[in-house]
Amino acid sequence: MTGPTSRPTWVVPPQGLDVTVPNVARIYDHLLGGKDNFAADREAARRLLAAVPDAARAARANRAFLARAVRFLAEEAGIRQFLDVGTGLPTQGNVHEIAQAADPRARVLYCDNDPMVVVHANALLADNLTVVASQADLRDPDYLFTLPVTRTLIDINKPLGVLLVAVLHFLPDGDDPWALVDWIKHRLAPGSYIVISHVTGDGIPAEAAHAAAEVYQGASAPGVARSHEEIARFFTGLEMAEPGLVEVSAWRAPLPARWPRPVLFFAGIGRKPLPEPRAVPGTKPPA
Ligand SMILES: C[S@@+](CC[C@H](N)C(=O)[O-])C[C@H]1O[C@@H](n2cnc3c(N)ncnc32)[C@H](O)[C@@H]1O
């Protein structure tokens, strides 16, 4: 018996998909050890790792943070509806699996501006009626919040967990990501949570950060590393859950880190404050 003599058809990319441009979802998939990526994505990941050898470790740490954050929201904060913006390609420990382990009735709306991500997610979710993936862009939150599927799945008047995990760094300052996050905060019911993780250049030499940014200049979206202070501004007006905005693997980590690591991501969770109880004339405020 001889081996295959031609390229199997399943590796031929779907029509309309430009696989010559490295794609941010697929570069991340490759860093996580996934299979849904093409040569240009792997080459971009190789260049990224040459500049920042810790990038794959940081991607895994970010994914582990996402799981801890969803568990925190579902198990401790009682959140039952989730909006995951910048979902990424399905991998292990997807948001709906963690949320529905806490409560099978939990609802999850996945949104991504990459059609390939949405196709993969919907294929995975074919049998799950309380989890939907939709194509939407974080730069147009109004569209995202008024989609029929959003209105069907999410009750915007009840607390919602909004996940902006490893996505805001794909929005350059010119898109004013702070204003976009403020828009979302304004729209949320009190008691809602916003989860953010974001790439930083704070912990690596400037040349390495520059080389990493160059890799993303040629990709489907540019990558913008931000400082702790710039990332903290996304949480303005929110109450920070302990331990605040910290290195991604330090956020409620089960075990302390065993060796010093370069800081590549900061992560944190903020809650929209509940309104102050209104004083009823003639009564004393609660002690
Ligand atoms: C690095 S992946 C993060 C995946 C997942 N949130 C995680 O942290 O494991 C970033 C995702 O954000 C998506 N993305 C980038 N810019 C976006 C935008 N403007 N609107 C919606 N999604 C975006 C990409 O397509 C990609 O799937």
Image (cartoon, grey):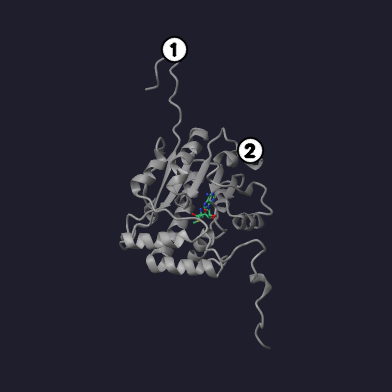
Residue 5's spot in the image, x, y percent? 66, 83
Horizontal arrangement in the rendering, residue 161 relative to residue 198 (left or right): right
Q: Considering only order in the chain, which callout, 1 or 2, is on the residue closer to the N terminus? A: 2
Residue 36's spot in the image, x, y percent? 58, 65
Quadrant of the drawing holding the C terminus? top left
- Quadrant in which residue 283 is drawn: top left
User: Looking at the picture, does residue 168 appear above or below residue 235?
Assistant: below
Tag shown at residue 281: 1
Q: Of helix, strand and loop, which one carries label 2?
A: helix
Tag shown at residue 65: none
Q: Nearer the viewer, mark 2 or mark 1?
A: 2
Inspect this view and state whether residue 53 appears.
no
Q: Foreground residue, 146 or 81?
A: 146
Q: Residue pushed farthest bottom?
A: 1
Q: Residues within 10 Å of mark 1 (few under 14, many from 20)?
A: few
Quadrant of the drawing holding the N terminus? bottom right
Residue carrying label 2? 151
| Disc 2/disc 1 C-alpha distance (Å) | 38 Å
- Residue at position x 64%, y 46% in the image: 130
The answer to whether marks 2 and 1 mark residues whose Cβ atoms lie closer than 8 Å is no
Q: Residues within 10 Å of mark 2 (few under 14, many from 20)?
A: few
User: Looking at the picture, does residue 16 appear above or below residue 2?
Assistant: above
Some atom of ligand 1 lies within 8 Å of the CB belonging to the residue at label 1: no
- Quadrant in which residue 256 is drawn: bottom left
Mark 2 is on which residue type? Answer: Arg
Residue 284's spot in the image, x, y percent? 39, 16
Q: Foreground residue, 99 or 165?
A: 165
Inspect this view and state whether residue 130 appears.
yes
Residue 224's spot in the image, x, y percent? 42, 53
Mark 1 is on which residue type? Answer: Pro
- Residue at position x 38%, y 66% in the image: 51
